[in-house]
Amino acid sequence: MGNVTGSVAAKFAFFPPDPPTYDVCREDDGRLVFSGVSADRNMEVHLLETKAGNKIVATFWKHPFARFTLLYSHGNAADLGQMHELFIELRAHLRVNIMSYDYSGYGASTGKPSEFNTYHDIEAVYNCLRSVYGIKEEDMILYGQSVGSGPTLHLASRLQRLRGVVLHSAILSGIRVLYPVKMTFWFDIFKNIDKIRLVSSTVLVIHGTNDDIVDWSHGKRLWELSKEKYDPLWVKGGGHCNLETYPEYIKHLRKFVNAMEKLSLKQTPKQLTSIPSITEEKHNKCLRLRKK
């Protein structure tokens, strides 16, 4: 078992871009801004302190007519500077606010990345949305990409009135990315296979059928275990880090957001389940494993 534990720690690690793709500076008026990334007047930068004592960078991308706010957790090989263009696209096409953040040890965030630090990180961001922007739980959609599905399901399993959850190229658990185990070991990380059962919100799963990093079976199983399922998007020929380039990606997300707008929280989300979608093949760094 010790060898397995060491393998998980060695292979399923965090890979923050080095050097970071941006820095944070303070303007004369006190506002925090990004340097190294093109400015966006509708992006607000925050430095948030977590329960672990780290200070993490979070960005809020405001849409003037937003109905919901998307809390986005990215993969383990990117920082906020690399997500800039995707957030602009999501904000425009989905008509939502975007709140994202860098994990401890990523970008300009302090500390070291770890599973439990990502949990403290997303909790700090959620608290910011509530206290600074007054955004209600029922007006939030949590979005987890790859390893970002870990903190996403950590938070989603603790909140009962979220509008929805999106799992994009998500993992069942850390060990299951490396080995096809049938049980959950105590030393496993990001135990999504257990937490998904506790999520009461509507869950959309997006996964590529040719994902050679996190097999499509991870997304399929997470969808099967979801209590409240939404029509999944199985991207035919899609890999792990290129699903945003497929035309059905935005179309299906927009469809999901529109469905959530019509959904009363007293209504059963099961009524929204339909036949899984598959799109034909027509890239942001989301997961990396350490090579031997």
Image: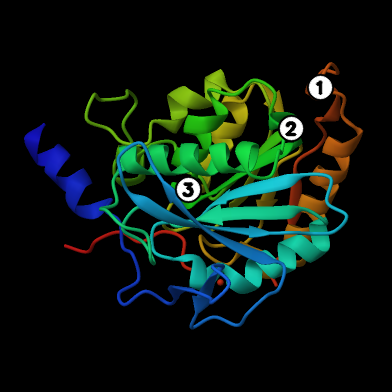
State whether residue 166 appears in this view. Answer: no
The single residue placed furthest to the front in the displayed view is: 29
Badge 3: few (under 14), some or many (20 or more) residues near its Cα, within 10 Å?
many
Q: Which mark is residue 265?
A: 1
Verify CB contact (< 8 Å) between mark 2 and mark 3.
Answer: no
| Quarter holding residue 201 | top right
Q: Amino acid at mark 1?
A: Leu
Q: Is residue 13 above or below residue 28?
A: above
- Residue 283 position, x and y percent, is 56, 72
Q: Position of residue 102 (x, y in %)?
A: 44, 57
User: Residue visible at 52% across and 74% down?
Assistant: 34
Tag shown at residue 148:
3
| Residue 244 located left or right of residue 138 | left
Q: Nearer the viewer, mark 2 or mark 3?
A: 2
Point out the tag, 3 or 1, that comes first from the N-terminus. 3
State the residue at coordinates (73%, 54%). Answer: 97
Kindly check if marks 1 and 2 are in contact, taking CB atoms under 8 A apart as contact. Answer: yes
CA separation, marks 2 and 3? 18 Å
Q: Is residue 225 above or below residue 100?
A: above
Q: Nearer the viewer, residue 156 or 187?
A: 156
Please identify the quarter of the rendering in which residue 40 is found. bottom right
Residue at the spot of label 2 = 163
Rendered location of residue 192, percent (x, y): 45, 32
Disc 2 marks which amino acid? Arg
